[in-house]
Structures are given as structure tokens and as C-alpha cells.
Image (cartoon, grey):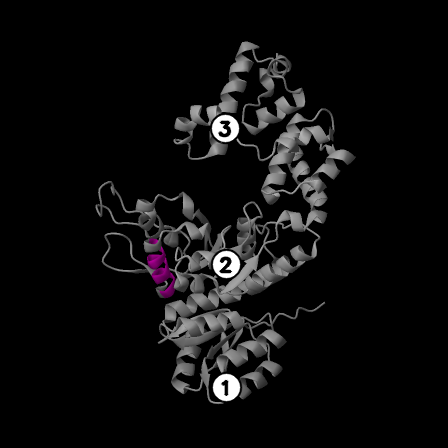
Amino acid sequence: MTSTTPAVTKALIVDDEPDIRELLAITLTRMGIDTDHAANLAEAIGLLGKQSYQVCLTDLRLPDGDGIELVSWIQAHKPQLPVAVFTAHGNMDTAITAMKAGAFDFISKPVELEHLRRLIKTALQLNTVNKFGNSNSPALLGSADTIGKLLKQIKKVARSQAPIYISGESGTGKELVARAIHYQGGRAEGPFIPVNCGAIPKELMESEFFGHKKGSFTGASADKQGLFQAANGGTLFLDEVADLPLEMQVKLLRALQEKAVRPIGSDREIDVDVRVLSATHKDLGVEVQKERFRNDLYYRINVIQIDIPPLRERKQDIDLLASHFLKQFAEESGLDTPRLSASAAKALQNYNFPGNVRELENILERAFTLCEGDVIEHTDLQLSGAGTQPTAATGASNLSKAEEVESLDEYLEEIEKEVISATLEKTRWNRTAAAKKLGISFRSFRYRLKKLGLDNEDDEP
């Protein structure tokens, strides 16, 4: 069987200015890429119908049409071909229109050759990803029509560099979708840097995002690289972007428009090559109306929007997800995979899951540790207690501790580890006795030991 992959990488350059075509051709030739030229829309479509190309560069203004028309033609006839559009410097409206039409990316005129080279390399990486795939791309499980639509959207937007806004309730898997977009795209070999915007103290935000120079403020004892620099060549995922204060939104907008950042204390900007994906569980449109989120930033990050359905709208996927999570817990703990009883499976189908897939995972992890034998019963799910609030007395007694906690999961794990270690010491590391003393099954106790890193086969007398 012969390969259909051309032996030579070819690019199509579409521009009515001969000097521009020549400059681009020289740059691409030095990268080992052959080029064909077209001076107008008709010539470009004619060449595309005869030849195979790995990338296309087109000017926006053409004598017989415009670059957006060519982008639309390519989307309809050669959707696997990445096409970049030249725009006037600072004309973000045009750039966004081009990307909404399906352009891979845009390049401002006058063309910066280093930027062009980076863009071409990223575009060509798509061929490798399409041919071989990427094992780092997370699996998005589901058979519902909404999930099928979501997977198609991810595959399509992964082929562009357009900013993506991911909308969905808490626990639906927004970061999972962002990772899939990154690892199915041309930046798969670059870093994926996730950041929770709501978790960064307001006074540290500029330093965290853009970095700082040594001595630029009290406590700046060394140069610090910002998140944009860390994500250079890859993807920056801004989770809970709605939590950014307005003054930081202005600085973020400038960084996105200029593709450059200025560290605190520096007298020059640093170019960054970063794709930005954003997400929040809030309705950004409402946040804009209430003037809590800048309209211009919303317009910039929401070039393409992806909506993730809540779990209650795809209940046919609950059994599949449950099987996946239970198998995962069993593999991590070295135990047999339990099954759901009929009553437990029915209870999950009837539950509303306000916390979505993340809540399903947490419910099943708890049930996995509580169940006796290899069957999870309805009572092991403890659904009746979901969503209950702590009493006033309990809340008041733990308030001072809670204010100091940065991660609830880590805090609870630390307490659990202390309790289990103390119990093991009292029982002289007899696990059976320790499990009995704590009032949990030996299966549950063994799982917790593995999860907390306390498992040591030599300790059992």
C-alpha cells in the first residue's frame, strides 16, 4: 500500500503583491518548504483543485474577492488544510472574523518573520497529530448525542489557534475538554498550563501571569517567570476566568492582542506564542451586562464557544462512566472491580447530580471503599446525605481552621492519614484490628492505605 503523503512539504501563498509573495517564498524555502503562488482568489482555488498543500497563507484583500472567501472555500472542500490570513496591524475585528470562518490563525502586516516561522511549524504539526494521534489526549466518555457533538467540536477547533471559551457547570469536565483541544492540535508537543484565576490573590496576579524582575518590589528576591512565559509554544488554560478583577482584565486583553507581556520591573516586552483557552461556570454574557467582565475581553476570548452538557442531560452515560471510575479505583488499589447492584444503578439514574461528573466520581469512590464484597449497594452510595449543610455549631467550631485551608481535599487527607496512623500504632500495625477499631471494612481500610501512601506489606504481623 503506497502512502498518499507527499514527499515534499508544499505551501500556497495567495497575495496580489509580488514583493510579499517573494519574501514569504524565501522564508518558507529556507524552512525546506516548496511554494506555489497565486495573485487572486480564482488562481488560488484553481491551484487548490489540482495540488495538495500542507499550509496556505492568504492576504485578506484580493483583487477578485477576499481571504475570508478563500477560508470558507477551504473549509468546504479541504477542511484538513490549515490556512492563515494576513490582516492589518491591530485589526482584531478582522482577525476574529477570519478565525470564526475557520482560519487556522492570523498574521499582522507588516509580517514578522519569526512569528511566521512559528505559525508554519505549528500548522505542520497538525499533520503529525492527525496521522499518529496523541496518547496524552484524555478520553471523553459518553454515547449521548451531546457528547458526540462535543467530540466533533473538539476535533475541529483543535485544528485552529482561535481562542476558545468553554462553558459548563461545575464538575462537567471543562479542563478535560481544554486538554483534549491542546493534545489534538498543533501545540501538542508544547506545555499545557492550567490556572484557576479565582485561586490567585489579587495583589499577586500580575506577577503570576507576566512574571517579575528581581528587586521590582518588596519580596522579589529573584526573577520570576510568568504563566504566559511558562506556556510559550503551548496552551494557557484560564479556568474561572470570570473571577479576574477588572484591572487585570485590561492587562490580559493587551497581552492577548499584542502577543507579548511585560514582566513587573522590566523595561521591555517579551514576545509569547500562546494559545488561550478560557472557562467558567458563570454566564459570561450576564457578567458583561452587569459590568463585572469587560465586553472587549469577552469578545476576544470567545471567538468560538463550546458548551459542555450537564450530566443530568445525558443520563444514558452514567453506567458507562460508573464502570470507568470503578475500574480505575480497582486498578489503583489492587482490588477487584465491584459492580453496581440493580438498586444502586437505579438510584444513580434517579439522582440529579448537581456536581455533575465530578460528583459521580466522588460518590463512587466513597462507595468503593464502603462496600462489602464485590457489589455496591444502594446504601453504599449515601445519596440521601448529598448536599446537606453543616450545623451552625460545627461550622463555627471549624471556621478558624477553614480560613487557613488552601485545599480542602489535602486538608481532609491529612486528617485521615493522622487518624489511620494513630490507630495502626495502637493496634501495633495489625490492619484487621485497626479496620475493626475504625468501624470500616478491611477492603475499605486497605484502599485508604494505598490512597494515602501508608500501604506497606511488611508491616502486617
Q: Report the residue that reaches farthest toward the bottom.
A: 64
Query: Is residue 271 visible in the rendered structure shown here?
Result: no
Q: Nearer the viewer, residue 42 or 92?
A: 92
Region rendered in magenta = 248-257
> Residue 298, position in %: x, y?
43, 61
Q: Nearer the viewer, residue 33 or 352?
A: 352
The type of residue carrying mark 3 is Leu
Q: Which residue is mark 2?
A: 165
The type of residue carrying mark 2 is Tyr
The type of residue carrying mark 1 is Gly
Above or below: residue 117 compared with residue 170? below
Closer to the camera: disc 1 or disc 3? Answer: 3
* Left or right: residue 63 compared with residue 142: left
Whether 252 is among the magenta residues is: yes
Pointer 2 or 1: first along the chain: 1
Q: Which residue is mark 3?
A: 412
Whether 218 is among the magenta residues is: no
**Residue drawn at the location 63% of the way across and 58% of the way down:** 151
Q: Quadrant of the C terminus?
A: top right
Magenta stretch, main secondary structure class? helix
For label 2, the crowd category at 10 Å Cα-Cα, with few meaning under 14, some 14 to 19 and many 20 or more, is many
> Residue 432, position in %: x, y?
64, 15
Marks 1/3: CA–CA distance: 63 Å
Assign a secondary structure to mark 2: strand
Above or below: residue 62 compared with residue 5? below
Residue 65, numbered label: 1
Assign a secondary structure to mark 1: strand
**Residue drawn at the location 61% of the way across and 44% of the way down:** 357
Q: Quadrant of residue 267?
A: bottom left
Marks 2/3: CA–CA distance: 33 Å
